[in-house]
Amino acid sequence: MVKGEGLIVTDSEGNTYLDCIAGIACCALGHAHPAIAAAVAEQATKLVHASNLFGHEPSATLADELAKRTGLDRVFFCNSGTEANEAAIKLARKYQWRGGQPEKLTILACTGSFHGRTFGALAATANDAYKEGFGPMPDGFAFTPFNDIDALEKNLDASVAAFIVEPIQGESGVNVADPAFLRAARRLCDETGALLIFDEIQCGSGRLGTFCAYERFGVKPDVLTMAKALGNGLPIGAMLCTEAASSGLQPGDHGSTFGGSPVPCAAALAHLRVRDETDLEGHVLARESHLFAGLRALADAYPGVYAQPRGMGLLAALPVVAPHEAGAIVAEARARGVLFGTAGGNAVRIAPPLVVSNAQLDTALGVLAGIAKTL
């Protein structure tokens, strides 16, 4: 790829594509958005780097904005979603240790989870394929079945420091959490003293039509991680937490050389301003109805190729019926000028920029229909 504008990207041979994966849910406002470009350029003439030894205006303002929008109190900036989850895991362990309960060290995650590729985040990831050849994994991690309340009642016990869960599991197939499961998690964490961590790296930052994914489920976590769309594609991640949870990390416990650097913070602030000016959340909710109606119609029209979709907002999976393969459908769609991704469970992953139009969604759906006709 050499160029992007809005939802259109161009490769080195001059071919253009409609981008319906957005860097795996990163480019919320599309490519080369003028407000993002202007903010980056302006900040680059002022201050590019300061490290977290010093404060600077972009990170302070962004922290205030994120606290206000999430309802959480403290913000730690880093460079990626993996790093945000790593910070959350360290926070949980140190929180229990500082609270006089060092025996509470288990990080409980869900089957189907994906939390990143550093050792701590990878240890909290359920897919063994990502771990092959990297063992042994760090101790103190365990798994409970996703959306199984009875199993959660047994597994979220007094040994658990924190329960980390994605409100929508992206990598394993865009699996949506049952609100009752998340409510049970909240109750059990309150009862046992564990921290509840929501990994909103893929499903958050407005992708579900609310700034935080948790708002659509009605369950508020103690710790929330975000990245991807926050900087509209620039590398920035954030771990947010309540005032009480923040006591786990004291100065010197954790840090990041480039975390919260001025340029990506300026991009994130521009992203938030555009979001407010354009009512992006309302736009997403309107496009959600159109997208899922179209995906359900595809599943009804081509039951030998597609099954009923999963997802919410502008994060969707269209399951592919065997013996057909999602990877082959994605490759053919690319040849026809539309970019999708794949997700676990043999599914096409659809996560376009949030500024997508109904007409662009119709183009993408039309390509999926055209492919199905040939199978």
Image: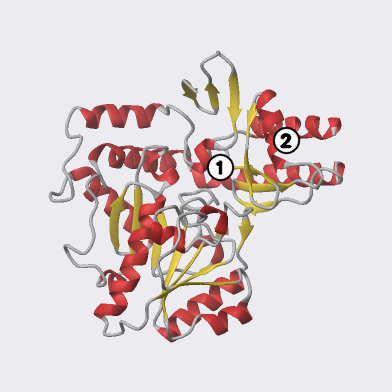
Residue 326: image x %, image y %? 71, 41
**Of marks 2 and 1, the one in the foreground:** 2
Residue 177: image x %, image y %? 60, 64
Between residue 117 and residue 339, name the one nearer to us.
117
Q: Amino acid at mark 1?
A: His
Label disc, if present, on residue 283 of the rendered structure: 1
Quarter of the view holding residue 101: bottom left
Q: Is residue 277 left or right of residue 369?
A: left
Identified at 52% across, 41% down, the residue is: 24
Identified at 28% across, 79% down, the residue is: 97
Asked if residue 17 can be seen in this view, the reply is yes
Residue 67: image x %, image y %? 32, 58
Q: Is residue 120 left or right of residue 28?
A: left
- State which tag comes first along the sequence, 2 or 1: 1
Quarter of the view holding residue 19: top right
- In this rendering, is residue 295 above or below 143? above
Element class at badge 2: helix
Residue 214: image x %, image y %? 50, 62
Q: Which residue is mark 2?
A: 329
Between residue 362 and residue 369, name the one nearer to us.
369
Identified at 33% across, 46% down, the residue is: 79
Asked if residue 69 can be seen in this view, the reply is no
Element class at badge 1: helix
- In this rendering, is residue 85 above or below 44? below
